[in-house]
Image (tube, rainbow, N blue to C red):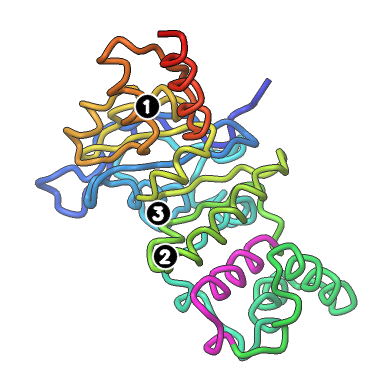
Amino acid sequence: MYLNAIEVRNLSFSYDPRVRTIDHVSFDIPEGSYTTLIGHNGSGKSTIAKLLLGLLERAEGEIRIDGLDLTLENLREIRGKIGIVFQNPDNQFIGSTVRDDIAFGLENHCVPQEEMDGIIEKFAARVNMTEFLNSEPTKLSGGQKQRVAIAAVLAMRHKIIVFDEATSMLDPTGKREINALIKGLHKDKRLTVISITHDIEEVAQSDNVIVVNKGQIALVGTPKEVFRNEKLMESMQLDIPFVYKVRNALKKKGIRISDELDMERVAEEVCQYVLKK
């Protein structure tokens, strides 16, 4: 049975006092889960991420991170539990080499030098960047830069990692690499992964989905549960995976297809249906 890594109750926030950016939002994120937050531009999902990290100060409500209330007194301890990977990896680079960059957070936490090299090499290997440890970050591809940013966060051994549009600036190859890496990280059930994303294919591989619309929670559920609501998703200018569009269209024609996210499986079931006819 999961405990909750994050609990949010009646959370509100405004950039402009006349308009609520986040309006009395409540949700839970289970420990060890992979949860995606989706919504159109300006829906408030990235603002929620910044509130969870204490980068913005809430107007109302409660936030609990790994059992701790998010307060000024607890902020330092909470930031030892939760890390973030931003949209643009260039904004996270500090060191002149990949090794220096991964080491930066460790140095700030006074990790002994004799332990540091082993930690750096461990997490560089985990993101397949060992051969680039002595390279300058500016010479890396977008996907490689994002891998280094992820390694730097992983090296801090946070229990929760937030990916804030971490693939939005990458080319298709880089996006696939980072999505595969995030999926691989989720195999470690001690780590809670939260991804703010527009990538509907990434949403499909997550455990839970939180749909944000106009500063409120519009929908919560598994990917299958969320994708069934095609009209609601369209009303919020959100897409659903192509395989679900096919499944929903077939269902309207009276053809029963299982709730699969695998296009090959759907095609197989359609063939079986036609043969039975």
Task: Report the residue marked by disc 2.
Answer: 87
| In the rendered image, the vertical position of residue 65 relative to residue 106, given as above or below | above
**Residue 226, numbered circle:** 1
Q: Earlier in the sequence, mark 2 or mark 3?
A: 3
Left or right: residue 143 versus residue 107 is left
Q: Is residue 43 above or below residue 231?
A: below
Q: Which of 16 and 133 is in front in this view?
A: 133
| 144 drawn magenta | yes
Rounded to the nearest angstrom, the CA distance separating label 1 from label 3 is 24 Å
Quadrant position of residue 254: top left
Per the rendering, the mark at residue 50 is 3
SS for tag 1?
helix
Residue 225's x, y, as percent? Answer: 41, 22
Foreground: disc 1 or disc 3: 1
**Please, what is the dominant secondary structure of the magenta stretch?**
helix
Say which residue appears at 29% left-offset and 43% top-offset. 39
Q: Which amino acid does label 3 sit on?
A: Lys
Give the foreground label among 1 and 2: 1
Indicate the amino acid at tag 1.
Val
Residue interval drawn in magenta: 137-154
Question: Going from the N terminus, do you reach mark 1 or mark 3 first?
Answer: 3
Q: In the image, what residue occupies the spot 47% across and 37% down? A: 204
How far across and how far down the image is residue 23, in percent? 24, 36
